[in-house]
Amino acid sequence: MPRGQPLPEETVSAIVKALRNGERCADIAARFGTTRQTVGRIARRMIGPGRRGKKPLYADEVRMEARRRYLAGEPVALIAKACAVHENTLRAWARDYGWKEELARLRQMPSHLDEEIARTVALLRQTNGGKEGHRLAMRIRMLQKARDSLAKAAPKPRDIPRVAAAHHADLLEKALADDYGLLPYQRAFLLDDARYRCVLKARQIGFTYLIGLSVVLGLAAGRDQVIVSASEDQARLVMNHVRAHAEKLGIAIDEDTDRQIRINGSTATALSTNWRTAQGYTGDVWFDEFAWAPRPDALWGAIVPAITRVGGRVTVCSTPWVPGNLFWKIATNHQGKYSHFTRATITIHDAIAQGMPVPGGLEELRLNFDAATWAMFYECQWAEEEGALLPWALLDELASDTPAAHGLPAPSGRGAGGEGRRKRGDAPRHGRIRIGIDLGRVADRTVIVVVGEAMDPVADAYTGQWRVLHWESLQGADFATQRSAIEAAMARYLPERVDIDRSGLGWQLAEELAKAHPGVVVPRAFTAPMKERLALGLLRLAEQKRLTIPRDATFMASLHAVRRIPAGQSIKYDAPRDASGHGDAFWALALALDGATPVSRATEVEVWG
């Protein structure tokens, strides 16, 4: 096999099978004409770390505790003793699960190094000297040296710039009154007069509502407002809050369009996350859900100059996502470069403690998410991979801010000469439309995912690039409602094939749809071998960058939920079952893309964005 050339898919499948049969990596490499490193990489990607083909020696709880201690900076020898795990196993986990890289990122923050030094000093005091004491003393010296280097490289602390009269004084007083209904953390944000602000927040704590209020107060004070949201839906939500607060405060709106609202001679403009078209505006700048924005560095460079001539302010707020992006750097004051920002962190626990109501209670809300997603969305912890089949970093590369679930008109015809076909410039054409459906009734949701394969407008041929055109989720809906939604999606997109889960309670609905649409609807049974094929097929498309998904936090979290789980002599692919489902969007997407390879031209529709 020539160096650098990817292995054929059938060869990769054969290597995985040999690994599961317990063959040695060296023997497999020799048989297939590749290297041991390549075989090891395939093993880690397709099977995951651990003893391939054998039952794992340690439970997930042991590995999670080891990870916690490792990231806290404890020496491997002490972790091994506390967790009853061999040191070499711990080092393998740190390598294969990315703990080493994660710890290296954490050690770029002075606060983490201070905590690690304090913990190591406490451990040293508990020893009686000897080799262990010497190792801990050397570790403290190493950590202190790293801390001193960060302090030396960090810019000198700067005064926090302030903004005078950022809000209309009388209206601000009215908004801060008890009868307006703001919670303490919302009032504290309005009273923060810093020019640069960063808020790390949980989801659904009323912060977009607060942005809408602050925008209205700024407009009333004669300050233009520039709002950048992570998606079109989020931008519409902010503008709706602006309208609602203007009405509540008794302020007349002079001009109101989809993207702009004018009050008292000042304009609030909602911008997309396309950095190429986001230049040329002035005013106070708002980045909403900035961690989820595509190409944040380019977007930042295009938007922030809007404050230059008018003395504007910059507010960055978001739920956390992957470490290392621009929002992470601002929120953690990476290398001391963002010390001119004020920072606030508001978890779901903080919001509830300050009076935010949660119907059903916190524990019921927690049932809707697996532990990792809950920690990220509600406890302001940065995303963790921990064996996910589709890592967050990969999902970030696949995500597009083009909306997938809304705004796409119905196709107007089938086939190359369908009557009523729209003709318009270079509209994206998706000739192969496929739908995947993961059925649920009580515990899980029913998720419908529509994908299309893009066509080359010049060659008039399929490109092998797939895009999620539409997705929807139904929870607790009866089968009649589910069938109606499925029929509507089929009528709108005219798919060449619909793959539907027929496992469990969905058998009857799948059978009825198959009879109503013979040759189009194909019922599929979720067996372990089929789930493995679906999962690895979706993984290959993702790694080959032949798939585009919506930049939707809920959809992406469902894709990220599926993991490799050791099960006796094999590996299964599944997600923790919770009240939000069972990785339902992942399986619906995998069904839609099963066997997604170029075929002869049969049907074609045009989809307009």
Image: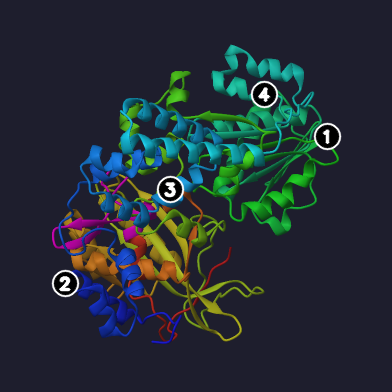
Picture layout, residue 372 above or below residue 360: below
Q: Nearer the viewer, mark 1 or mark 3?
A: 3
Residue matched to label 3: 554
* Label 2 or label 3, whichever comes before in sequence order: 2
Q: Amino acid at mark 3?
A: Thr
Picture layout, residue 480 above or below residue 5: above
Q: Is residue 420 left or right of residue 592?
A: right
Tell me if residue 498 can be seen: no
Classed neighbour count for the residue bearing mark 2: other residues with Cα under 10 Å, few (<14), some (14–19), many (≥20): some
* Label 1 or label 3, whichever comes before in sequence order: 1
Camera-nearest residue between 125 and 463 = 125
Residue matched to label 2: 21
**Residue 386: x, y in percent?**
35, 50
Q: Secondary structure at mark 1?
A: loop
Q: Is residue 575 left or right of residue 359?
A: left
Classed neighbour count for the residue bearing mark 4: other residues with Cα under 10 Å, few (<14), some (14–19), many (≥20): some
The quarter in which the N terminus is drawn is bottom left
Q: Quadrant of residue 253?
A: top right
Q: Amino acid at mark 1?
A: Gly
Q: Which residues are magenta?
A: 558-587
Q: Secondary structure at mark 2?
A: loop
Q: Residue furthest top?
A: 178
Residue matched to label 1: 265
The quarter in which the C terminus is drawn is bottom right
Distance in Å between CA atoms under marks 1 and 3: 38 Å
Q: Secondary structure at mark 3?
A: helix
Q: Are marks 1 and 3 in contact (CB under 8 Å)?
A: no
Q: Amino acid at mark 2?
A: Asn
Q: Nearer the viewer, mark 4 or mark 2?
A: 2
Residue matched to label 4: 192
